Image (spheres, grey):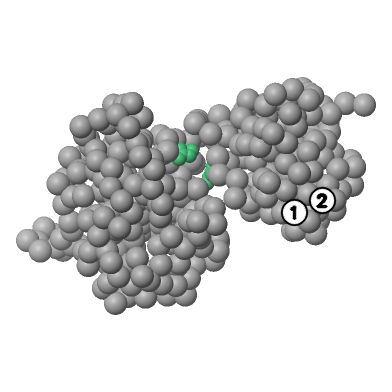
């Protein structure tokens, strides 16, 4: 009997082609709810499931699952209990690397978009309120010379630093907030002498733009809450292209409303696709629907990696991008 793949949501070419070359593919007609997904995973009808961020793969589901692996169509995998998967001998794979530049582009877009009030500006033109050049129409903030604080120092943070330096920003980073770890010259690499490591407290207090590039784990859940927001500069802008729950979104709405900070550019939300009450009404925000990796080329590459991971799982080979290697060694 060949390999059997369950695809919870159709992925772009060449993903489905790679899967169908390697076995039998079932694509669900609509995203499954939790009981449906749990039932399918424990049915014994599938070897590998290809999941999306909205598919919750938790410990109870994994304990009953009859699967070799879970291949996530994302670099982040906070939707999967990786430790529980390891205990059950179920492999997990992700799609790192290919979406780094695209996501850093969106971080930069949000920095520029919030600084220069792009949503308000676009809206003014579209609604026929543009009456010609005015000395004080929609004045924003300068990006060049501003301090960009990067929370995290992974691939996407570095790619954002590269862009920010091109825009003349002064770049600080805290590698593992709220904790710390030393970053040596060698790890700094191309950034030696160009950007500077800071503690989390200094990053919070000095940043004109504070941009989040950490994974969602217990230590980073609500990393940015009312306490942190109140320590930021009143003119500061929060940028989040990582994961919504890293920010306490209700606290953020209060802070934006009360002028505790000046603005926010968000590509992710705490309870996607829902927004915290009042967020959508705030003019000092740029809100995007989780499109960090959404280019045609990147989504194709993600689909390819996701399918290659899945085929390797089904065939019992080493995955190109394993998340929990010990699970099956
Ligand atoms: C998207 O958020 C991803 O993790 O790939
Ligand atoms: C995750 O891919 C990161 O680059 O930080």
Q: Nearer the viewer, residue 142 or 176?
A: 176
Q: Residue furthest right?
A: 1
Which quadrant: the C terminus?
top right
Residue density around tag 2, few if under 14, some if 14–19, many if 20 or more, within 10 Å: some
Please say if the residues under marks 1 and 2 sit with CB atoms less than 8 Å apart.
yes
The numbered mark at residue 59 is 1
Q: Quadrant of residue 191?
A: top left
Residue at 75% in and 32% down:
328
- In the figure, 194 relative to 235: above or below? above
Residue at 20% in and 32% down:
193
Please state if 96 lies on the left or on the right of 306 as rendered: left
- Relative image position of residue 153 (x, y in whole percent): 38, 40
The numbered mark at residue 222 is none
- Relative image position of residue 78 (x, y in whole percent): 59, 50
Q: Nearer the viewer, residue 7 or 44?
A: 44
- In the figure, 282 relative to 223: above or below? below
Q: Nearer the viewer, residue 237 or 292?
A: 237
SS for dot 2 = helix
- Relative image position of residue 23 (x, y in whole percent): 82, 27
The numbered mark at residue 63 is 2
Residue at 41% in and 72% down:
251
- In the figure, 166 relative to 227: above or below? above
Is residue 14 something that shows in the picture? no
- Relative image position of residue 324 (x, y in whole percent): 66, 37
The answer for how far apart the CA atoms under marks 1 and 2 are is 6 Å
Label 2 beta carbon within 8 A of ligand 1: no
Q: Quadrant of residue 263?
A: bottom left
Residue density around tag 1, few if under 14, some if 14–19, many if 20 or more, within 10 Å: some
SS for dot 1 = helix
Residue at 38% in and 48% down:
180
Please state if 3 lies on the left or on the right of 327 as rendered: right
């Amino acid at each position: 009997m060949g390999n059997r793949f369950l695809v919870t949501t159709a992925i772009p070419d060449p993903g489905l082609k790679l899967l169908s070359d390697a076995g039998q593919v079932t694509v669900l007609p609509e995203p499954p709810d939790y009981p449906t997904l749990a039932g399918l995973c424990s049915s014994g009808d599938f070897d590998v499931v290809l999941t999306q961020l909205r598919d919750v793969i938790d410990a109870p589901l994994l304990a009953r699952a009859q699967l070799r692996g879970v291949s996530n169509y994302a670099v982040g995998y906070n939707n999967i209990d990786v430790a529980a998967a390891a205990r059950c001998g179920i492999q997990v794979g992700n799609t790192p690397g290919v979406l780094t530049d695209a996501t850093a582009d969106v971080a930069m877009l949000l920095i520029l978009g919030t600084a220069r009030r792009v949503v308000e500006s676009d809206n003014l033109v579209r609604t026929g309120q543009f009456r010609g050049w005015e000395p004080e129409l929609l004045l924003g903030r300068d990006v060049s010379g501003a301090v960009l604080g990067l929370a995290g120092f992974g691939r996407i943070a570095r790619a954002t630093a590269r862009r920010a330096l091109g825009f003349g920003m002064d770049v600080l980073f805290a590698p593992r907030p709220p904790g710390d770890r030393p970053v040596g010259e060698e790890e700094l690499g191309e950034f030696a002498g160009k950007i500077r490591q800071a503690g989390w407290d200094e990053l919070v207090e000095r940043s004109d733009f504070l941009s989040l590039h950490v994974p969602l784990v217990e230590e980073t859940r609500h990393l940015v809450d009312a306490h942190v927001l109140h320590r930021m500069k009143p003119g500061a802008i929060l940028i989040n292209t990582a994961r919504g729950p890293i920010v306490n979104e209700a606290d953020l709405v209060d802070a934006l409303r009360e002028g505790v900070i000046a603005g926010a550019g968000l590509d992710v939300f705490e309870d996607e696709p829902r927004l915290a009450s009042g967020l959508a009404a705030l003019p000092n925000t740029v809100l995007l629907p989780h499109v960090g990796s959404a280019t045609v080329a990147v989504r194709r590459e993600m689909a390819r990696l996701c399918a290659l991971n899945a085929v390797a799982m089904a065939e019992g080979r080493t995955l190109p991008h394993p998340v929990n290697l010990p699970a099956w060694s």
